[in-house]
Amino acid sequence: MERSQRFWGWIFIMPLTLGLTIWVAFPLGISLVASTWRWDMIGPPRFIGLGNFITMFTADPLFLQSVIVTLKYTLLSVPLQLLIAFGLALLLTSRVKGIGIYRTVFYIPSLIPVVVSSAMWLWLFDQSFGLFNIILQQLGLPAQGWIFDSGQVIQSLVFMNLWTVGNIVVIFLAGLQGIPRQLREAVSIDGGNLWHEFRHVIVPFMSPVIFYNLVIGLINNLQTFTQPYIMTHGGPSNASLTYLLEIYQQAFQFNKMGYACAMAWVFIIVTMILSAVLFKSSGRWVYYEGGGK
Amino acid sequence: MRFPRAFAFRSLVTVLMMLLSALFLLPFLWQLRSSVMTISEIFASPPGAFPHVPQWRNYVEVFSIMPFARYYLNSLVIVIVNIIGALFANTIIAYGLARLKFRGRTLMFSLSIATLMMPTSITLIPTFIEWHFFHGINTFLPLTVPAFFGNALFIFMLVQFFRGIPLDFDEAAYIDGAKYPQILLHIIVPITRPALAVVAIFTFLGSWNDYLGPLLYLNERRLYTLALGLQSMLSQYTSDWHLLMAAATLVTAPLIILFFLAQKSFVEGLTMGGIKA
């Protein structure tokens, strides 16, 4: 039985073993080697050592621009996403009629392809005939530039992204539903109000879920690509040139494969440091049941 | 004193929910409204809220200006192969990791989990280089083959599920002379249906909605998926918003139908691992 388990065990996980080799180990290796190359995928590669990294930090204004854009977008988007998703999830725990319908309505936008939502919002943002400016004009307010204005494009994309918080809402909601009712009721028995219940029961109990959504949210938002690629092409004047969009352009429009790989390594190192910091800080504010960490 | 306050609170929440729902639905309503208008109604000023006569023929016209039927077929083929691959690979991998004892399984499980934290942007270009050398560009292979190697999130989810099934099931069958593949197929898989439904649905969602993959690997028009087709239409018919919105609706419709058919699995899947579609 033991031998049979060992034999079949390795047979069964064969796809995983191969997959980790072909889709993780090899790519990481290729990428690391290519990051030291100047290479257009057609001619032979030329070894330039740390040349790509040096260029990036000293002689590439677009690199710096994409870092700034990505940070601006992420720092605005993630907190707002978490706050709004948490608020909506809290609302969905109240006992009003038709809760299932509201839940569905909040969730559906996160289901549709990003290409579709990009097309929809491109039209919503249209300066003369889009819904948003029509509403503003009806209210007697001045029309806005939205994604066509370099000063508003980031905020507009974040606004659009908030429309798709539904999947975060569902995760928060599942967490909220896991809070024992006695715990919430105990607060009001002890004379506490809704704020006390929120501060001393809901937030501590939900902290692992908040932490999870924070980490996933950061990784996802830092990799924003499709919306700026389709809607603004990174513009106007590179105001929405996200980091992944810049990697894509370097690799597939300028054929600088080595440079793009180097950029990807900078990205993974930064995200690893960020995750490490978050995990370290989590000991202070994330509570796990039973006290284990 | 308490009752009226609770009532007032509940009414307030209801009103708030209705307002928020309207806000979330607004983009869809705008899309549907635009999709059945004439071009002159789209650009009328002042703009009207509704079309004079709903132009359902816009939906037909989409199929004549773009090979949308072809795109549907391409997307469907890719989705189906992905589902087959995902169901097969994730099930056997998770079974091996969760229910068979052998040295190295903990390590392999940890490695698999570790890839969850790895941003996809790091493997994007080297994977493209690999496919370039395998002559996989302009084929569906790069968009389908990876499914047959499992997905860390689904493996994790299924391992959790499998661990909840008593081991006696396998042992009894083993003593009766069954081999492990038979045990998996005849005993474990039937109990695992709900979790497998989650895998199938989220695989559907992931590959139907995938944009970056087709963008990198498919350059020939006849190979385009719906996502890519819509984007190329967007760059060709920049101001035909009535047709673009009809096309957008056509791309979304299968997902909405799938959602209403399998709402329960959607919620289960999200709460099992928070899959970002």
Image (cartoon, rainbow, N blue to C red):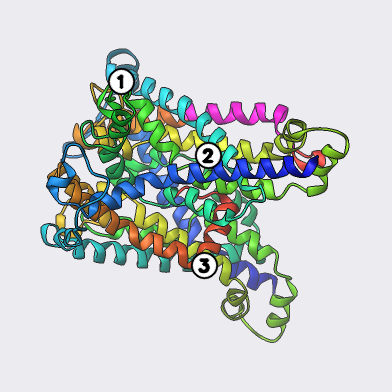
Q: Is residue B125 magenta?
A: no
Mark 2 and mark 1: Cα distance apart in space: 32 Å
Q: Which residue has dot 1 on it? A: A51
Mark 2 and mark 3: Cα distance apart in space: 24 Å
Hey, what amino acid is under mark 2? Ile
Residue closer to the observer: A160 or A19:
A160
Q: Position of residue B8 (x, y in %)?
A: 67, 41
Hey, what amino acid is under mark 1? Gly
Q: How many marks?
A: 3
Tag 2 and tag 3 share a subunit: no
CB under 8 Å between discs 2 and 3: no
Query: Hey, which quadrant is residue B78 in on the image?
Result: bottom left
Q: Which residue has dot 2 on it? A: A216
Numbered badge on residue A217: none
Residue closer to the observer: B170 or A207:
A207
How many residues crowd mark 3 within 10 Å: few (<14), some (14–19), many (20+)?
some
Hey, what amino acid is under mark 3? Ala
A124 w.r.t. A146: above or below: below
The structure residue drawn at horizontal position 70% and vertical position 69%, both measured from the top left corner, is B165
Of the residues under marks 2 and 1, which one precedes in the sequence? 1
Chain letter, disc 1 residue: A
The structure residue drawn at horizontal position 59% and vertical position 75%, both measured from the top left corner, is B184
Q: Quadrant of the C terminus of chain A?
A: top right
Residue A12 visible? The answer is no
Q: Which residues are magenta?
A: A269-287
Q: Position of residue B9 (x, y in %)?
A: 67, 40
Q: Which residue has dot 3 on it? A: B197
Residue A245 visible? The answer is yes
Which secondary structure class fits the magenta region best? Answer: helix
Chain letter, disc 2 residue: A
